[in-house]
Amino acid sequence: MSIPAIVATATATLLQVMLPNGAVTGPVVVQVASQSSNGVTFTMPASIPPPAPPAPTPPPPSVPPVNQAPTVSAGSNQTITLPASASLNGTATDDGFPAGSTITTTWSKVSGPGTVTFGNVKARSTTASFSAAGTYVLRLTATDSASSARDDITIVVNAGGISGSSLVAGNVSLSATFEAISIRARFSGDSNANATAGIRFRKSGDLIWHDAYPPIIDRRTSINGMNNSAYALEARASIVGLIANTTYEVEVTWADPDGIVGGSSITRKVSTLSYNPPTNGVIRWVDAAAASEGNGTSRSPFKTITNAIQRSTAGDTITVKSGSYGPFTISKSGTATAYCVLKANPGDIVTIQGSASDSLRVDADYWRISGLRFAPSIQSSMVVGVGRHHIYIEDNISTDVGTGNIWSSGGVSILKNANNIYVLRNQFYRTSSGTDNVDGVFIRDTGTHTLVIADNTISGNFWDGIGNGVNDHLDSMENSDFAHNTIINWQDDSIELDGGSVNLRVWGKTAISNIAYSAISEAGTIVGPSYIFRNILVNRGPKGTGMKQGNNGVGFCFIFHNLIETAGTGGNEAVGQAGGPVYSENHVFRNNIIKATGNAYYDEGRTNSYDYNVLYAPGFTLVGSWNGSANYSTLTSFRSGTSQEMHGINADPRLVGTNRTIDSTSPAHDAGILLPNFNSLDSAWPYSGSAPDIGALEF
């Protein structure tokens, strides 16, 4: 039997065939057309290995996956009635790409008449509160880091449920100085005036919150016939004892038994001021001994300060060598990122001569002026012009201010609408005679804010140490600090707080006079709150008083931890009303030592609150003309008749030394009340005993 085989390869010397199944040993014959070869014997092996499997088919080339945008749904449209909130139930899914990414979601307001506050703006299921009725479109956006998608939902907010007694939280604005923050938190509603607010703060990045002293809530639309719309319907407060050039978070939380429309808590950030603003220019030199005007280099200095200012650019530092220089005006401004600097060369005495008016006038912004010595001046040593801002006046000396005894003169006189003026570590002296006209620092007009007058020495025959001409104006001295000043032998008031005084703070001051009419004038805070704390106020003037009040002073004022002492010839009340017909209201006295050669309190009362104070008036009626009529000779009768000073003390405070401190034997020791941010353990003035000490300094 013949079995045909398939020829795989054939050459002249080689023949390869594929044997079919069933092949056995036998001859192999090659036949081409009609010709056949001789047979060749082929021996079939016992077994034939199976053919090798075919090579695997290579996989197709890989194709990277295409990222798909997330799938997102904002949920169903809703209708709610205020003050209810909307419950949002969004969803979002993703295909898992890009690899390793996670899906994130964010809620936002697209349109609507009011403010929308989300419970958690990043959560898919959360709440939304609305400040006003109307139709709102909210959007849920989802992203996987490479692509995003969004979906909208419509919320119809009906007004039917709004009650005028419900509070609607508004904007929170913060402003800062070097060591303090001012808070103004707007609101509406609350027609029954029962809402309250609390404030916490912390350094940005810290975990622990700290309590601020509770804010005042101002609902007055007019004050003594003056329009108060700029400050009405606000909670206001100050946070004190802070660190310069530091960012803080501030949280305002509202509470109202009638409900709150919108979110109850609002958090904002603000940074305290820096003592070292930026400069980035060149150093220009001035030398009065130069033969002629040079080009401002150290080898070829300018001859006059005026020429140096004209030739300078923003960010330059003008360094002045020893010599006498004429009066001048600064009229070229720096910038917020490039302050101009005018300073005395370290160790040199640079004297600015007086003139028929003012020695130096600043009609520019963003300047630092330091180390100058002002010769006696007819009027002011330095004047800050109308509307000028961001000016540092540091480490200067005025030898005899205001020899002409002209009203509104001062070591520094600050004009209308000036702001961010920092008067730091200067020495102002006055030996010339004259009354009622010349102050160490004088705030001449309205519209001022963010004034820091700190660490100065003001000594001599000044009318007021720090005075003003805005006694009856609401918009003055807002967000300002008068701190750490030493004021000696003024004639009228060491400091006048008289005016709007919204978040004006006076602290750390030592004021001692043998001739003054009053140790300090708070006559008065019209709007507030103002804060007077940790001061030593001593008036030994024969006819002098301590804290002068009254004169429209119906604003909020907090008087904490002061020593107020009179040591005259008799009739020298420590705290009393000096002017009217509108006397002080809304004042709070806590933890003060009040020692007098006269009444401790005179003509006080009304809505003011007095407690935890040490009162001492040996040989005089303790409280005179309370509410204009009643006299109380003892603390017991005063408590019984007024319910004031229920924790007060009537005893000698046992003051020690020229700083008028106390020791462990004083009745003021460990006898005060805790005041958050003013004496709490997390404050700049922590108490050290079983309770805070009463008085300016902790023993």
Image: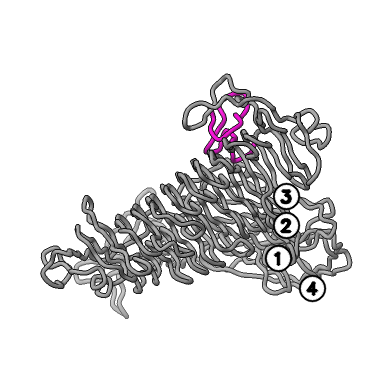
Alpha carbon distance from label 3 to label 1: 16 Å
**Residue type at tag 4:** Gly
Give the mark nearer the N terminus: 3 vs 1: 1
Q: Quadrant of residue 562?
A: top right
Question: Pointers 2 and 4 in contact (CB under 8 A)?
Answer: no
223 to 519, vertically: above or below: below
Within 10 Å of disc 4 (Cα), the crowding (few <14, some 14-19, many 20+) is: some
* Residue position marked by numbered label 3 in the rendering: 586
Residue 460 vs residue 620: left or right?
A: left
Give the mark nearer the N terminus: 3 vs 2: 2
Give the mark nearer the N terminus: 2 vs 4: 4
* Residue position marked by numbered label 4 in the rendering: 134
Task: Find the residue positioned furthest to the bottom.
Answer: 33
**Residue type at tag 2:** Asp
Alpha carbon distance from label 4 to label 3: 39 Å
Residue extent of the magenta highlight: 675-699
Question: In the structure shown, which secondary structural element does the residue marked by tag 2 occupy?
Answer: strand
